[in-house]
Image (cartoon, rainbow, N blue to C red):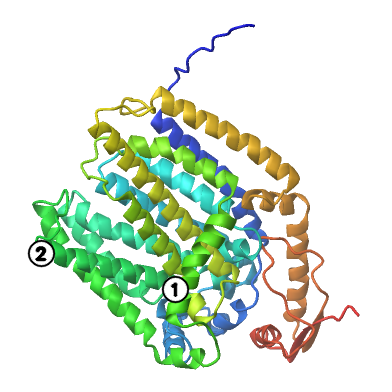
Amino acid sequence: MFNYRLSKWTKQINIKRMSMFVTALYIIAVLPLLIIGFYNWPSADDMSLALQTYRYYSETGNILGTFLLAFKVGFNEYMSWMGYYFSNVVFCYSPSIFGERWYALTAFCMIGILTFGVCYFFKALFVYGFKREKYEANIVSMITLIIITQSMPKGTARVEAFYWYSGAVNYMFMFGMGLFWIGLLIRSVYDEDVKACFRKLLWACFWGFWLGGANYMTALEMAICSFLIIVIFILSKTSFINIESIDGDKKKSFAKIWIPASINLIGFMLSCFAPGNATREAIVEGFGPVKAVLIALYYTFDICVNEYTRWEVIVLLLILIPVSYKISENIKHRFEHPFIFTLFAYGMVSSNMVPPIYALGNLEAGRLKSIVWAEYVVMMVLVVFYVTAWLRQVFENGNSALIIGNSSKEIFSSEASFAISVLALLLVFGSGLSVKVDPQYYAGTSAMYDLASGNARTFLNENEERLAVLNDDSVKDCVFKPYSVQPELLFFYDISTDKEDWINRAMARYYEKNSVVLENEN
């Protein structure tokens, strides 16, 4: 027989450099998603929800008037059709009201607010709440964003998350804003500057009200957080619980935390009891509240855990274990309830599903799947951090050393560096195989595929050909050929051969035509 000796791994990864690397990786991965956005085109509700602002701007060119008109339209919708008053307003701001080619901004807006929300939340939690380094928080943020954007379920979820404005602004945009709001609440207490705390509190009050009128999935989650904040605030006043790291000026800041939480709940109630909801409820069928909750609990496991958690998601979450171990170093807070926190995270993901199941009886729409996915990823990341921090404290209390080892402030230990490197190599190797078999495996590679194949360009050209006809005043009854291509990230919905179809009528009204119809191929 033979023997051999492998040299011990001694290299250590610099935390700042890793932060810069994952940031660059995220930018590279998301760049194709932004580039293909230049070939995007409005469709479906874009031509009905933004109709009034489109016509007003086309006739007057008044940007301020257009901005203000959206609030009037939103109020009318609140009174007659649906209660989410914040979404009603932003529906009217589709970039296409300034011209169809401006619709390219949709992807930039949605990916931008998601990125901002995730980064702001994790920075508030780790840097301001737990007093850790900004580079550590950034690593968590970037990996979270990579998972959300690249591993989002294939199909309509991707296009409705970032490219179809009317769906994306009501769901992914609001999800990003929700994370931003939670970050504001954290910073309104833990920011070192008293004046900064007060400014964050005012912003939290402002956005708390508006987020009460977001889509009911996001609004419900924010309302749950607000309710828990108020409960914690009351229990802290009775000395039943003690809030850690709260003293001096921070106590004064925490004493006001109930204000934005209460304002958010008031906004949520205004949305729930909107006059227009009765009109919409009369034409939709869903499940009862108890059945909706039970189905949501099942769907969390069946859809999120069983269907959406692909191999690369697990690998990236494993990379977060040594990162979380490093972040949990010298944190004063005691992580003592991993099981309860995991149940809480599971319940939050389930609560995200309850509104559409209650109202519609399903989760079929891609825009619904997109924020269920995003919420699930954020909660998984938080669970990984919490459980890892709990394990570290358990081992350290027992005077034992975890296999990840010790390291200085600026670097990961040799053991952690080895684990991260091996997992990164596995990610590269597995991704190469997956994309080779399926070019649309990741959202970014799907965008690259449609860009390289010319599908995105063809899609844009065909839409511009249609636009030339729609802008021709001499043509009152428009007949179009079906799209020859349907890029995964860009194609949402097309008109049909029935001129009385709702989308056909919406397009005809938008461009002031008698009728718009798709050519019958038969």
Marks 2, 1: nearer the viewer: 1
- In the rendered image, residue 133, in percent from the top left (x then y), is placed at 31, 38
Q: Which residue is mark 1?
A: 293
Residue at image position (50%, 72%) is 295
Quadrant in which residue 185 is drawn: bottom left
First of labels 2, 1 by sequence position: 2
Checking the image for residue 237, the label placed there is 2
**The one of 450 and 418 positioned closer to us in this rendering:** 418
Q: Taking 145 as reference, is 186 left or right? A: left
Type of amino acid under label 1: Val
Q: Residue at x 91, y 80 (%)?
A: 522
Label 2 residue SS = helix
x, y percent for residue 216: 43, 75
Question: Where residue 326 sits: x, y (%)?
Answer: 34, 34
Q: Is residue 61 left or right of residue 15?
A: right
Specify the label residue 99 is tagged with: none
The three-letter amino acid code for the residue at tag 2 is Lys
Q: CA distance from mark 2 to mark 1?
A: 32 Å
Q: Is residue 509 left or right of residue 226?
A: right
Q: Secondary structure at mark 1?
A: helix
Which residue does the image show at 30% across and 73% down from the upper left? 264
State yes or no: discs 2 and 1 in contact (Cβ < 8 Å). Answer: no
Q: Position of residue 87 (x, y in %)?
A: 45, 76
Q: Is residue 417 visible?
A: yes
User: Camera-side residue: 320 or 238?
Assistant: 238
User: In the rendered image, which quarter contains the N terminus?
Assistant: top right
Q: Residue furthest front?
A: 1
